Amino acid sequence: GAVVSQHPSRVICKSGTSVKIECRSLDFQATTMFWYRQFPKKSLMLMATSNEGSKATYEQGVEKDKFLINHASLTLSTLTVTSAHPEDSSFYICSARGQGALAEKLFFGSGTQLSVL
Amino acid sequence: QKEVEQNSGPLSVPEGAIASLNCTYSDRGSQSFFWYRQYSGKSPELIMSIYSNGDKEDGRFTAQLNKASQYVSLLIRDSQPSDSATYLCAVNLGGGADGLTFGKGTHLIIQP
């Protein structure tokens, strides 16, 4: 168990458009999900913590009005990049904690490569 | 501020040899430590977790933790070309629902 599904895997969009990325926990309930961003040859940077039924907690320097997070159910969190610009091009990855014996481990979605033209 | 440091490499190891990956962390209160493997263009995959001082073995992988020195390592025995990847060290302060802080990763190359 502890499978996290993320889609789309790749998005190419024009500057100024909005892009929605979905993250689902398939075989467990995730009250908390995390969104990371990774630039080429760089480490994963935590963007925000998504809490089911409440507002997301954003890391310092991450614009909450630009990166909208919705966690409406125990199995789904979405990240919307609003008015995307080329500097937002990156690899976005969601993750969730497992349950029970896997509760201290983070499991990752397959990632979304966003390219903004 | 929590920091996790790794040598970015590349670290080149002959096939069949032992690959040794190292990581240091700044937050002495850190409780949970993880090693992830990441292939290019893919998301990280959990390899090992370790929570207490000493060694933890799982197949060809051994994680080593020394909290006094704030040091965690990963050994890969009998290295295979398929082990070539970037290995990310990640640290979690305490338990609960906090996100992980990742190192920049070490690029490991296993030479056939």
Image: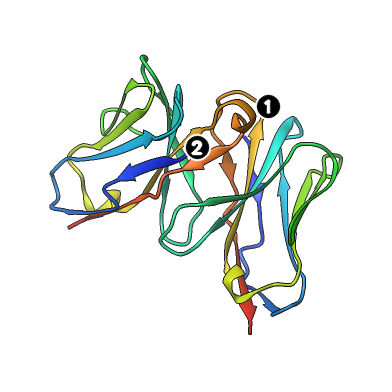
Q: Is any atom of residue A46 visible in this view?
A: yes
Task: Residue B24 in the image: state x and y as whole percent.
Answer: 73, 49
The foreground one among A17 and A101 is A101
Q: Which mark is residue A63?
A: none
At horizontal 43% and vertical 58% (from top left) the residue drawn is B42
Q: Residue at x 66, y 45 (%)?
A: B34
Q: Amino acid at mark 1?
A: Gly
Q: Are marks 1 and 2 on the same chain?
A: no
> What is the count of numbered marks?
2
Q: Tell me the amino acid under the disc marked 2.
A: Ala
Q: State left or right for residue A12 relative to residue A78.
A: left
Of all chains, the one bearing label 2 is A
| Scheme by which the image is coloured | rainbow
The residue where tag 1 is placed is: B94
Viewer-closest of B90 and B84: B84
Q: CA distance from mark 1 to mark 2?
A: 21 Å
Q: Are marks 1 and 2 in contact (CB under 8 Å)?
A: no
**Quarter holding residue A115:** bottom left
Q: Is residue A60 visible?
A: no
Q: Nearer the viewer, mark 1 or mark 2?
A: 2
* Residue that numbered label 2 is attached to: A2
Is A61 drawn above or below residue A53 in the view shown? Answer: below
Residue at (58, 40) in percent of width and height: B101
Identify the chain of the residue marked 1, using the numbered disc in the image. B
Q: Secondary structure at mark 1?
A: loop
Q: Would residue A73 be found to the left or right of residue A95 on screen?
A: left
Badge 2, how many Cα within 10 Å: few under 14, some, many 20+?
many
Q: Position of residue A11 (x, y in %)?
A: 22, 53
Callout 2: helix, strand or loop?
loop
Considering the image in quadrants, where does the C terminus of chain A appear?
bottom left
Q: Position of residue B15 (x, y in %)?
A: 69, 80
Residue A42 placed where, x, y %? 48, 56
